[in-house]
Image: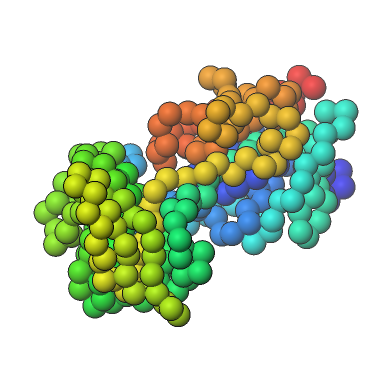
Amino acid sequence: MNVNEWNLIIVGAGPAGLTSALYGARSGLRTLIIEEKTPGGYLSEIPLVENYPGFSEGISGMDLAAKMNEQTKKAGAEVHEIEVAESVQVSEQIFRLKTDRADYSCGALIFATGTHRRPLGVKGEDQLRGRGVSYCALCDGAFFKGKKVAVAGGGNSAASSALYLSSIADQVYLIHRRNEFRAEEAMIRPVKDSNVQFIMNTEILELKGDRKLSSILLRNKENNDTFELQVDGLFVEVGEIPNNKLARDIGVKLDEEGYVLVDSRQRTNLKGVFAAGDITSHSVKQISTAVGQGAMAATEAFYYLKRS
């Protein structure tokens, strides 16, 4: 077998991808993961994980990701990080994957490509990105020690970011365009008990600032009043967009929101192509469900290869 020929290739090294690689390698498959950043995905950005079995006192997302990565490598899978998967071609049940470093081939392919942050889509956002506007509190929070910041969003990620920032920044505002949060009660409860100030039923109209963010123009949806909030930073947590380009380009079926459609065994509409984790149409986006899907995808890939 050529050095660039593999039984199983997984694109994406979040919890789903790492678990797929672990199960693939333990099944005896020559297994490769391609990851454009570093292993862990969004997991590495979570300050504290308290709902993953086996860690009753919680564990940082970065530490959990490191343990998963170490275990995957120990099982025999190869992990290529900081390598971008650019395209996939299908020919006679062989998948040919081109990256920015090399060309690979495999008999089975798993997409665990996850999602990327959804932008606000308001005036000033693009110009101020990296100049006060961030999409990762864990990555950039330290730059705002003792300053005023805001978090936009109402889900678990927004709640987690607001709580994390409350121990760093002097003032934290949580801006949500609805009256109720989408976050789980267990996630939002500690935020309510912190010094985070809620600004509810309010939408962001514009981000202002010359060389860096200085204020946010807001509109209260109840009375239609507009006002400015002076802040040094804004952390955007308003949802995700599926990273579906590779799957879409080879004809994998997607749902109306762009997530990969899979059956109960993580199979897509294409033979030999599987998907796991946040990229799929599964309604629950959690570490535990990603791990379960990754295990199922790799197991199905193993049986598919044995039958081929």
Q: Position of residue 258 (x, y in %)?
A: 57, 34
Name the residue nearer the viewer: 59 or 120: 120
Q: Quadrant of the N terminus?
A: top right
- Give above or below for 210 relative to 67: below
Q: Position of residue 143 (x, y in %)?
A: 36, 76
Q: Quadrant of the C terminus?
A: top right
How is the protein colored in the picture? rainbow
Picture quadrant of residue 206? bottom left
Q: Position of residue 88 (x, y in %)?
A: 78, 42
Q: How many marks?
A: 0
Q: Is residue 8 visible?
A: no
Name the residue nearer the viewer: 16 or 146: 146
Q: Would residue 229 be found to the left or right of residue 99 on screen?
A: left
Q: What's the residue at 14%, 62% (across, down)? A: 195
Q: What's the residue at 53%, 33% (across, down)? A: 257
Q: Residue furthest bottom?
A: 211
Q: Would residue 205 be found to the left or right of residue 66 on screen?
A: left
Q: Would residue 38 be found to the left or right of residue 100 on screen?
A: left
Picture quadrant of residue 294? top right
Q: Would residue 68 be found to the left or right of residue 110 on screen?
A: left
Q: Position of residue 115 (x, y in %)?
A: 53, 45
Q: Residue furthest left?
A: 193
Q: What's the residue at 68%, 58% (across, down)? A: 83
Q: Is residue 32 visible?
A: yes
- Give above or below for 249 relative to 139: above
Name the residue nearer the viewer: 212 or 260: 212
- Give above or below for 211 relative to 239: below
Q: What's the residue at 50%, 39% (across, down)? A: 278
